[in-house]
Structures are given as structure tokens and as C-alpha cells.
Image (cartoon, helix red, strand yellow):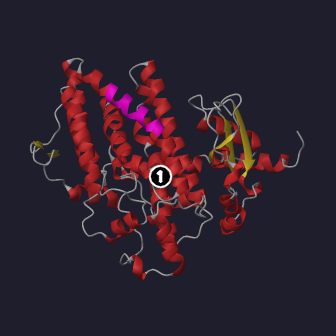
């Protein structure tokens, strides 16, 4: 998802009976549904895992502004432009809520950003794909933000208070993002033949990357099991993916677009759609840094950070000079 | 250059209600903190007033003191009006 394959640093998930002292009391509280707050005692591995997960989520929001920012100056109308600006501004805000949530765990935002720029921290695989046409902006809102909502709604109830509260704010705004995307796709699908083709082409390119956003099946992953025990992962990757597919397929049909999967079938027995095989090699290659835009995205982030340094320094110098002045 | 300080943001959502904590942000000074808070936390008519406080200036109770601070109130159920049963015939009290 926005945080994919988060490493918990544990080798094995311990049973409740194997835990002692603080660790036992901590797990008991989580099992009882009591939220963990910044000042509470927590295992070091829980803290580190959350820093990884929340910062990866924050980086995804910020890097996610780049593919959409690409179309702000070329939006087809003033309303579309204002809407896209508002959406991209929201994404910056989501990054801020999440960095602030991560900072409650005793790390600094600058250190997290340094880790991103040094290639040590990840962001979601999805933002390494290019936005070639205006329809891609529709596809991102509809599919990528749609997938994000499915992942983030359960996280509102996760065990860590500041992360859950940030998710509540994010989810409220995300719904606007998905609808504006679907609105773009609907209008294109109802437009000229060229517009309809453009919408279908965007769906063809974004469908599988969106399906992969949820990450590979959890299988026997010790990290998934540990994150589930800590209640910072509430559903399996496959369950969330299924929810996304079941929700999205009828929306595509409704506007006359075709999901690019020859094996897609409604399975009456399961009450869910079955899909064809997912190309996980592509996913791993993007995660490793070899997607279509990995280098470009990171270079754009670094350049924005470096070129903004004088502004940050000047503001800090101004504040230091006027510190202590009475208003 | 060192990082901008952290500020906690409080928004009053409408006249008559109290300011409520909504989140935090980083800013070089109070003026910038209010500007950033306006941009981040009030884009959809969430508020009519903003307070910002440096996070470092907030004193908080410690989780370790939870029991001595809050447990004594648990046994004092008579502090709630519902503790007292109204006799028949009293309609509003």
C-alpha cells in the first residue's frame, strides 16, 4: 500500500505466554483495544516499525504530488485546474500529518527526509509510473486514491493513537480525491472516440500497478503477523486487494470501460471477482528502484529540497533575529 | 541550519465552542505557524480561530501518574446526577 512490506525486525512472533513484564502488559493493552500514546511504554521494535511504516506513508504522500503536479499547468479547464491544485495541496497536508505522527515517536522530520533522499526509506511503488495523458489524472484519483481509502479506513482504528488520528483526517479528504478522479474518467468515457480511447488507455496502464499497491500476499510473512499482533496492520494484503477489485470492477462497467484482465470473472460461489495472475516481478523491480520513474522522482524531491534550503535558512535567521521581541 | 521548531495547533470550529487540538506542524516563528496552520488545517471551513503553541512549552501529565491522578474519581459516582433516582411524579429536574 502506501507502506509496503514493512520490516518489523522480528524473527518470530511470540505467544502471549512467552511475553513478560512490560512487553506482556503492552500486548494485553493492545489486545484489549486500548490505544498506545506517545508517552506510553512501548517495545523498541514496535516503535521502529511504526517509524518505518508512517514515514514510508508520509514519503508516498509527498512523492505522490509529482505525477499529478505534472498536469496542473495543462488541465483542460479552470475548474479542473483548481480542483487538481486543491487535491495536490491535500497530499502535501497528508504528508505533514504523517510526518508529525512519526515525530511523536522521537524522530525528526529532517532525518526522515534525509533517509528518503539517501534511498534508505521507501515510498509506494505506484508513484514510479508516469502520467502520460490527462486521463492518467482521472485514473490516479479513481484507482490509486480508491485503493488508498480501502487501506486507510481500517488504519483509523490502528493501535497507535497519533497514526490513527492522522488517518481520520486523511480519509475525510481522500474521498474527494477519488470522486474527482472518477468524474474525470466518466466524462472522458462519455466523450469523443479519442477521449474514450484515452480513458481506456489510462485504465490499461494503471490497473495492474493499482492492484499491486496492496503488496504481495502475506503468506507466512513474520512481519505481517507481527504487525497484525500489534494492530498496525488490520487486514491481509489479499483481503484489501479483493475489496478494491470487487468495488472497482462494477464502477468500470458502469462507464463502459474494460478492466485489462482476460481472466476476470465473477465467482458466484465465493461472492467475489477472480482475477488473472499478478506480475510480481514487475512489482519487485519497481520496489528495487527500477520502475519507469524511480530516478526522476527522487531527483525531483532532492532538487526541491536543495533549492529550498535558502528559504528555510532565511526564515530561521529572521525568527532568531526577532526572537524575544514584544508584539 | 537547524530544524524549525514544532508547534501544536488548536482550532475553534465555530463561535461558542472551545479551541481543540488538531495536530502539529513546523514553522520558524509564530506568524508562520499561524499561516501554515491556516493552509493545512482550515481549508474546508474547519475553523474561525487558530491558536499555536510551541510544543516545547507544553507541560503534560505523565502516563505513570494515571492512577493517582484519575483513579480517585472512579469511586465518586455521587458526583453524577444519574446517581440519584427521582421519585415518581417529578418530570423535569
Classify mark 1: helix, strand or loop: helix
Q: Tell me if B43 is positioned left or right of A229 in this view.
A: right
In reply to whether residue A177 is colored magenta, the answer given is yes
Q: Where is residue A106 shown, x and y percent of the image?
A: 61, 64
Instruction: Give whichever of A158, A52 is nearer the camera.
Output: A158
What residue is shown at x 61% (from left), y 33% (from top)? B42
What residue is shown at x 84% (from left), y 49% (from top)? A323
User: In the displayed structure, would residue A285 be above or below residue B80?
Assistant: below
In reply to whether residue A45 is colored magenta, the answer given is no
Query: What's the magenta region?
Result: A172-183
Report the number of discs.
1
Instruction: Give whichever of A9, A61 is nearer the camera.
Output: A9
What residue is shown at x 45% (from left), y 59% (from top)? A53
Q: Where is residue A274 shown, x and y percent of the image?
A: 14, 47
Q: Where is residue B85 shown, x and y percent of the image?
A: 63, 44
Q: Tell me if B59 is positioned left or right of A275 in this view.
A: right
The image quarter containing residue B63 is bottom right
Residue A261 in view: yes
Q: Chain of mark 1?
A: A
Amino acid at each position: 500500500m502506501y507502506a509496503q512490506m514493512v520490516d518489523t525486525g522480528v524473527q518470530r512472533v511470540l505467544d502471549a505466554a512467552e511475553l513478560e513484564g512490560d512487553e506482556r502488559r503492552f500486548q494485553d493493552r493492545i489486545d484489549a483495544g486500548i490505544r498506545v500514546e506517545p508517552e506510553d511504554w512501548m517495545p523498541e521494535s514496535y516503535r521502529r516499525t511504526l517509524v518505518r511504516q508512517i514515514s514510508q506513508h508520509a514519503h508516498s504522500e509527498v512523492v505522490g504530488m509529482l505525477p499529478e503536479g505534472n498536469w496542473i499547468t495543462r488541465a483542460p479547464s479552470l475548474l479542473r485546474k483548481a480542483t487538481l491544485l486543491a487535491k495536490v495541496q491535500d497530499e502535501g497536508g497528508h504528508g505533514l500529518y504523517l510526518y508529525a505522527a512519526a515525530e511523536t515517536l522521537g524522530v525528526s522530520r529532517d532525518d526522515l527526509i534525509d533517509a528518503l533522499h539517501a534511498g534508505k526509506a521507501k515510498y509506494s511503488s505506484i508513484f514510479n509510473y508516469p502520467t502520460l495523458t490527462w486521463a492518467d489524472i482521472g485514473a490516479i484519483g479513481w484507482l490509486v486514491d480508491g485503493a488508498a481509502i480501502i487501506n486507510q479506513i481500517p488504519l483509523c482504528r490502528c493501535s497507535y493513537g497519533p497514526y490513527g488520528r492522522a488517518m481520520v483526517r486523511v480519509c475525510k479528504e481522500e474521498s474527494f480525491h477519488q470522486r474527482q478522479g472518477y468524474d474525470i474518467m466518466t466524462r472522458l468515457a462519455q466523450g469523443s472516440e479519442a477521449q474514450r480511447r484515452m480513458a481506456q488507455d489510462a485504465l490499461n496502464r494503471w490497473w495492474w500497478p493499482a492492484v499491486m499497491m496492496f503488496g504481495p500476499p502475506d503468506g507466512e510473512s513474520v512481519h505481517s503477523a507481527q504487525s497484525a499482533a500489534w494492530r498496525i496492520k488490520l487486514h491481509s494484503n489479499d483481503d484489501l486487494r479483493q475489496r478494491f477489485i470487487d468495488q472497482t470492477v462494477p464502477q468500470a462497467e458502469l462507464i463502459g470501460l474494460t478492466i485489462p484482465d482476460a481472466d476476470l470473472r465473477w465467482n458466484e460461489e465465493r461472492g467475489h471477482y477472480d482475477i488473472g495472475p499478478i506480475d510480481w516481478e514487475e512489482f519487485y523491480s519497481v520496489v528495487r528502484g527500477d520502475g519507469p520513474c524511480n530516478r526522476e522522482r527522487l531527483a525531483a524531491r532532492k532538487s526541491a529540497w536543495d533549492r529550498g534550503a535558502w528559504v528555510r535558512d532565511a526564515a530561521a535567521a529572521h525568527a532568531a533575529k526577532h526572537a524575544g521581541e514584544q508584539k | 541550519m537547524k530544524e524549525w521548531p514544532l508547534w501544536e495547533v488548536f482550532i475553534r470550529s465555530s463561535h461558542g465552542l472551545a479551541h481543540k487540538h488538531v495536530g502539529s506542524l513546523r514553522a520558524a516563528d509564530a506568524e508562520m505557524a499561524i499561516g501554515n496552520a491556516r493552509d493545512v488545517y482550515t481549508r474546508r471551513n474547519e475553523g474561525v480561530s487558530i491558536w499555536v503553541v510551541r510544543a516545547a512549552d507544553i507541560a503534560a501529565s505523565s502516563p505513570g501518574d494515571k492512577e493517582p491522578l484519575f483513579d480517585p474519581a472512579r469511586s465518586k459516582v455521587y458526583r453524577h446526577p444519574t446517581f440519584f433516582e427521582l421519585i415518581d411524579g417529578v418530570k423535569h429536574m
